[in-house]
DNA sequence: GTGAAAGCGCTAACAT
DNA sequence: ATGTTAGCGCTTTCAC
């Protein structure tokens, strides 16, 4: 450590001074700080982590960088983690289980103190294995819960209910659903749709499962062809496909058909008409994830599963049915 | 290292076996691998980095997680870096110079072997200081070049030219420009617009500088009020504002007015009409960044500044002017 | 208030 | 083919 030499003291003193320990005389401390500054010295996280056994690093693994839902959760994590002095490291696994697992592994090898997984794609046993080494919290709705892993999710059931109730209150009776590809979140949304429709004394009008990606358009077309006055879509992209198709077939929303999305992505603000959508409290979810992690680091051992209530953001894609 | 004990050998052998060194007998190797597996052992990147002096870690610093342009560049970096055995670590600085600087520092303290900065917000001296420690390449167009830092950028001049020429070829003569907020990239686009219009024997019809964010709508309205038949916007979001305003005032694109964006974000595919936009070869830029880094690690010392040619993606927001 | 020495988990050079 | 030793840069006792 050349700072030690430059200041004419021992390594130990440099270490103490740099961390603002009180047991160093003001004069020496000043001399050391000055030398460090001059030499552009910065302590090495690796070396410190090695001896201290912790790194103040928080790993965040996410499925999809391009997904604004994910990135906003990450922002929540970053914000709250930084407040507590953690440095957030991101790793990106794509929608690829093995890559996700590899990235998680990479984070663990770096001795991160804890991990947030913003993904519901990782296999439970991989997750559980990670949780045996450091606290792990997953943001999202798991297929199967992994023991030792805390979760933060939004209440998809409640979100679906809010969407359907909104449409029913506008006077719609033929409310269809464009469902997702069968991941847990979309399954719960679909179930919530069915239940709520029944609670309201209606019948599920029509449900079509949109395959991810290319077939969304086809599914939207098929669904609209059945003549609903309103559609609750499993996410904003699916809602967009409905909006589009409705426009093309000469009954644009909201007059021709009302459309509600889920996730309240930036898209909802961007498209015309602006999309009514169910908003997940993403920042809050991120912050909550950090809190759960800190609790674990503080010694909690029982698993926690937090569920947050989403809320409906009403915009311009929903209106009373025309023939009313 | 309890794996050593479990397998009844020395630490060194474990180390060798785990890295597949040949100088270990098949039998012992198997025994070690087995023990490691059973104990869930993984070598510690920190410790290895400490002794080897390199970590095979590649740090990526980005301004804006929510920006698909950035994240796609990152994908290019990830892809190519992983091929070479590097692990990519992401850090997120927001549009905040001091936070960007802090995150960069955090990456450096982790002893990453090199850094890609996907941002043009970082101050040149911070960048230069980082480059004195490890190879640094910046993707984007810097305000001022930082010595020792390689750059990868798209040719904004050429992109603007392609956009304007496309509009002129369609027969437009009143081509306006919705300019950006004065960052280098948008300044070059504006200059390219002006020059190309003149080269074509026309006059710059009208240029309005959109302030980032809220005032984009106002700027778009103002610009359209001047009666252009075509607008080249400095980016897709600005183009969207124009599209919107055109729609609201009863002359929707492309019949009412032709619109070209820049960046070819996912939005361009999503909005109706689909947006004609200048595409930056983002994946390629990411890969190129990795290559420059590897060259530096291989010993190159002179700075390189790569400029890639963007290409225009023609969609449905542009057409010949109506009154022709 | 300060310094010397041990050791974090690993690899590399050098024995054996 | 295997074990021993030193040391990466730091923090942390423990003496002084």
Image (cartoon, coloured by chain):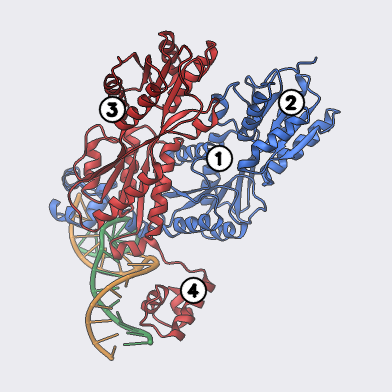
Chain colours: A red, B blue, C green, D orange
Work out whether disc 3 and disc 1 sit on a shared chain.
no
Image coordinates of residue A262 in percent, x first then y, are 40, 29
Task: From the image, tell me which residue sits under label 1.
Answer: B288
Earlier-in-chain disc, 2 versus 1: 2
Point 35% across, 32% down: residue: A96
The residues bearing labels 2 and 1 have C-alpha atoms spaced at a distance of 34 Å
> Which of the chains bears the disc numbered 1?
B
Image coords of residue B5 (percent x, y): 14, 56
The answer for which chain carries disc 2 is: B
Residue B85 visible here: no
**Between marks 4 and 3, how big is the CA–CA gap?**
57 Å
Q: Secondary structure at mark 4?
A: helix
Q: B79 or B249: nearer the eye?
A: B249
Say which element carries label 3: helix
Q: Is residue A31 above or below residue B257?
A: below
Mark 4 nearby-residue class (10 Å; few <14, some 14–19, many ≥20): many
- Evaluate whether label 2 is on the same chain as label 3: no
Residue A73 sits in quarter = top left
Front label number (4 vs 3)? 3
Q: Chain of mark 3?
A: A
Q: Find disc 3 in the rendering and name its residue.
A: A188
Tag shown at residue A98: none
Q: State if disc 3 and disc 4 touch (CB < 8 Å).
A: no
**Residue highlighted by disc 4:** A36
Tag of residue B230: 2
Viewer-nearest of labels 2 and 1? 2
Which label sits in the foreground, 2 or 3? 3
The subunit carrying tag 4 is: A
């Amino acid at each position: 450590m050349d700072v030690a030499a430059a200041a004419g003291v021992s390594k130990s003193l440099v270490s103490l001074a740099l961390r603002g320990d009180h047991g160093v005389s003001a004069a020496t401390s000043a001399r050391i700080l000055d030398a460090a500054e001059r030499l552009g010295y910065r302590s090495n996280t690796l070396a410190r982590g090695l001896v201290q056994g912790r790194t103040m690093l928080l790993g965040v693994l996410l499925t999809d960088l391009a997904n604004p839902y994910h990135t906003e959760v990450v922002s929540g994590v970053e914000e709250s983690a930084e407040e507590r002095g953690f440095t957030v490291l991101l790793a990106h696994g794509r929608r690829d289980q093995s890559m996700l697992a590899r990235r998680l592994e990479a984070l663990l090898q770096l001795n991160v103190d804890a991990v947030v997984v913003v993904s519901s794609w990782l296999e439970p046993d991989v997750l559980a294995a990670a949780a045996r080494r450091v606290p792990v919290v997953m943001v999202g709705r798991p297929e199967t819960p992994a023991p030792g892993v805390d979760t933060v999710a939004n209440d998809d059931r409640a979100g679906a209910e809010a969407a359907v109730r909104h449409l029913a209150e506008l006077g719609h009776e033929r409310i269809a659903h464009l469902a997702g590809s069968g991941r847990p979140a979309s399954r719960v949304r679909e179930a919530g749709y069915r239940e709520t429709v029944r609670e309201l004394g209606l019948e599920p009008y029509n449900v079509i499962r949109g395959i991810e990606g290319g077939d969304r358009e086809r599914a939207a077309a098929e669904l609209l062809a059945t003549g609903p006055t309103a559609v609750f879509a499993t996410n904003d992209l699916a809602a967009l496909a409905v909006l589009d198709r409705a426009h093309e077939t000469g009954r644009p929303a909201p007059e021709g058909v009302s459309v509600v999305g889920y996730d309240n992505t930036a898209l909802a603000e961007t498209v015309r008409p602006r999309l009514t959508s169910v908003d997940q409290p993403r920042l809050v979810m991120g912050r909550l994830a950090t809190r759960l992690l800190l609790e674990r680091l503080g010694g909690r051992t029982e698993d926690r599963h937090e569920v947050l209530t989403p809320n409906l953001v009403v915009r311009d894609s929903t209106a009373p049915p025309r023939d009313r």
